[in-house]
Amino acid sequence: MSAVACVCARALAAVALALLAACSSAPPPPDWQMNAKASLERATAAYLAGNSRLEALEFNRARAEIARTGRTDLLARAELTRCAARVASLVFDDCPGFAALVQDAPPAERAYAAYLAGTATPQDAALLPEAQRSALAGGGSGQSLAAIADPVSRLVAAGVLLRSGRAQPPLFALAAETASSQGWSRPLLAWLNVQVQRAEAAGEATEADRLRRRIAVVTGGVKPEAAR
């Protein structure tokens, strides 16, 4: 079994951050593989922490390592890693890096891209890891998401539900507290702002003010351009 195959059934940490990791029973992986995996992990952590400059630097390092192999399918998976971090932070785009490589992407990666876009079909869902299948089937209340152990996977699932218009208010709080517990300021700010909008729409001025004070605590140590 290949290094990629033995991790692809895990949650987002495997689908994204650890897609390039080797199985413990396999020979030591080549340097490019270890370097790419480490840089992808650092890039994702930097993005979630609100450090766009470091994220770009580390992602470009990972991409350069993978490019040495000529494996466009692995480059596509790396781009999905980047897209997933953005969905977790409610930054919704068309995942242009993956779109440029989709022609050579395996079916499972195409299905995961559809999942991130909030457009996954039942056929796509069958190709997703169990956590993502459960999130799609469980609705937007947050109960199914609470069972997802990996915090990145949970935030991505929450972002997908919001993007597809299926998220319910209890999910907002779960996502915010997930980001808070990890110290991930970018998704925390995004979800706190969603909560503010919900509170304002419901006429809950006191709750909206409380959430704004919490946002002010976070932004006091985060540059505004890095928190968007």
Image (cartoon, rainbow, N blue to C red):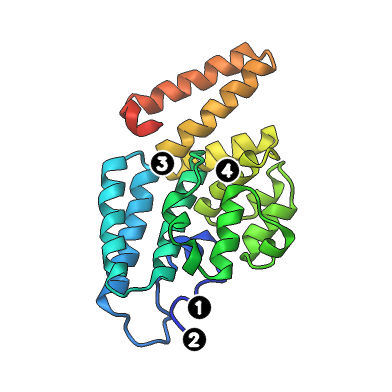
Identify the mark nearer the N-term, 3 or 1.
1
Residue behind mark 3:
183
Q: Which element is circle 2 on?
A: loop
Whole-number angstrom distance, CA of label 2 to CA of label 1:
6 Å
Q: Is residue 62 above or below residue 199?
A: below
Q: Which quarter of the figure has residue 215?
A: top left
Residue 5 bears which disc, if any? 1
Residue type, numbered disc 1: Ala
Identify the mark nearer the N-term, 1 or 4.
1
* Place of residue 64 in the rendered image (x, y in percent of width and height, measured from the top left): 26, 63
Residues under numbered marks 2 and 1 in contact, where contact means CB atoms less than 8 Å apart: yes
Whole-number angstrom distance, CA of label 4 to CA of label 3:
18 Å
Residue type, numbered disc 4: Gly
* Place of residue 177 in the rendered image (x, y in percent of width and height, measured from the top left): 54, 38
Identify the mark nearer the N-term, 4 or 3.
4
* Place of residue 29 in the rendered image (x, y in percent of width and height, measured from the top left): 32, 80
Q: Which element is circle 3 on?
A: loop
Residue appearing at x 46%, y 19% in the figure = 213
- Which is more foreground, mark 2 or mark 3? 2
